[in-house]
Image (spheres, helix red, strand yellow):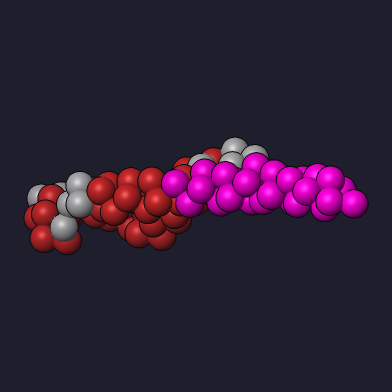
């Protein structure tokens, strides 16, 4: 009788250690690394002042064609799509 209880306890603890605790540790490490990577990458993104200065150098004839092609909507849309694709590929078992 005592051997059956010890065996059942051993199976339960083995499941917890292999199935729950180790997987939680791996997923937490992946989440933490992704969080730190994104916060490190944000520091490299230029500020709004440098972007405004770069865009103010465009001549009016170029602004006409940029407005005609609606790049004011297209560029943020593409950046959001690329960012979403990058983040989805970092999800385990999806990308």
Q: Is the magenta stretch mostly helix, strand or loop?
A: helix
Residue drawn at (25%, 48%) of the image: 40
- Residue 26: x and y in percent read 52, 44
| Quadrant housing residue 11 | top right
12 or 3: nearer the eye? 3
Task: Identify the image quadrant of the C terminus.
Answer: top right
91 or 49: nearer the eye? 91
Seen in the picture, residue 95 relative to 83 is either above or below; the reply is above
- Residue 37: x and y in percent read 33, 46
Residue drawn at (62%, 46%) of the image: 17
* Left or right: where 37 falls relative to 2: left
- Residue 36: x and y in percent read 32, 50
- Does residue 22 show up magenta in the picture? yes
Kindly tell me whether residue 86 is visible in this rendering: yes
| Quadrant housing residue 56 | bottom left
* Left or right: where 9 falls relative to 31: right
* Left or right: where 47 falls relative to 25: left
18 or 81: nearer the eye? 18
* Left or right: where 78 falls relative to 92: left
| Chain part drawn in magenta | 1-29
- Does residue 40 show up magenta in the picture? no
Kindly tell me whether residue 78 is visible in this rendering: no
Residue drawn at (58%, 50%) of the image: 21
């Amino acid at each position: 009788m005592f051997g059956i209880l010890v065996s059942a306890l051993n199976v339960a603890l083995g499941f917890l250690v292999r199935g729950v605790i180790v997987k939680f540790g791996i997923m937490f490490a992946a989440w933490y690394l992704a969080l730190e990577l994104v916060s490190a990458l944000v520091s490299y993104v230029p500020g709004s002042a440098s972007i405004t200065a770069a865009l103010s150098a465009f001549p009016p004839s170029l602004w006409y064609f940029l407005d005609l092609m609606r790049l004011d909507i297209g560029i943020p849309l593409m950046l959001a799509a690329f960012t979403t694709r990058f983040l989805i590929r970092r999800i385990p078992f999806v990308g």
